[in-house]
Amino acid sequence: MRPSARNEILDAAVRVVDASGEADITYEAVAQEVGLTKAGLRYHFPSRDAMMIAVIEHVVARWQRELVEELGAPLETSTLEERVRAFVAFAGEGGASQGEFVVFAEAVRRPELAAPWLEYLRTWFGFGEDTDSTSLLLVWLAANGLWIAEATGMLDVGCDQRADLVSRLLALAGGEPR
């Protein structure tokens, strides 16, 4: 399958999750959203779990592209502090949709789907590798809390308050606030 077709299917699956608020995606719903047949989807994704893992990998890949862009340097040459600061900026700008949160939550609910998330977390954040990463972990957890609260609709933070929160989190992570 050409990469653009695969991305179109996976983007459609994320839209289905966004619209339904549930990670129990069906071939029918994704096929209708992308304009393919169920058989066409089954050809590329032989099971719903295979499709779900591909969706998770797709979301993680997008996040990583955006985080690298925010980082402004190759991941391999960055410090944990720089990666946490990039995540704070990413999460502070909205970072992820409600559907992406649902996909993430499904991996927590079904551990067999968790491998892509765990790899992303280990690669980007590997807390515990540094001698004192406690303050960075606190900042990362707070940024995740902001993202989760907004992605689930539990909290609507105004632009000024968000900017203040991001600025304070960046200051706590080290370096200059924005």
Image (tube, rainbow, N blue to C red):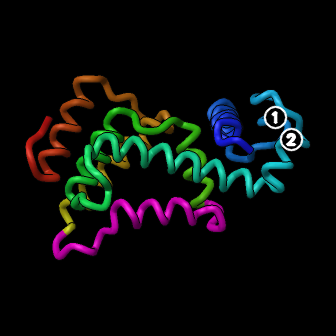
Range covered by the magenta-colored residues? 109-132
Q: Count residues near mark 2 (Cα–Cα under 10 Å), then give few for <14, some for 14-19, many for 20+.
A: few
For marks 2 and 1, give the CA distance.
8 Å
Outermost residue, left direction? 176
Q: Does residue 21 appear anywhere in the picture?
A: no
Within the magenta stretch, is there residue 126? yes
Instruction: Tell me the crowding category of disc 1: few under 14, some 14 to 19, or many 20 or more residues within 10 angstroms, Cα based.
Output: many
Read off the residue under disc 2.
Answer: 40
Q: Position of residue 21 (x, y in %)?
A: 64, 37
Which of the pair 176/149 is nearer the observer? 176
What element does badge 2 sit on?
helix
The correct choice, above or below, for 91 with respect to 158 in the image is below
Q: Label 1, secondary structure: give it.
A: helix
Taking the spot 54% from the left edge, 37% from the top edge, the residue there is: 98
Q: Which mark is residue 48?
A: none
Return the disc, 2 or 1, that comes first in the chain's sequence. 1
**Within the image, what quadrant is residue 170 found in?**
top left
Of tags 2 and 1, which is closer to the observer? 2
Q: Amino acid at mark 1?
A: Ala
Q: Which of these two is toward me, 101 or 4?
A: 4
Q: Is residue 58 left or right of residue 37?
A: left
Q: Position of residue 38 (x, y in %)?
A: 88, 40
Looking at numbered disc 2 in the image, what kind of residue is underneath it?
Answer: Gly
**Residue farthest along the right direction in this orientation:** 39
Q: Are marks 2 and 1 in contact (CB under 8 Å)?
A: yes
**Looking at the image, is 81 positioned above or below residue 69?**
below
Residue 31: image tag:
1
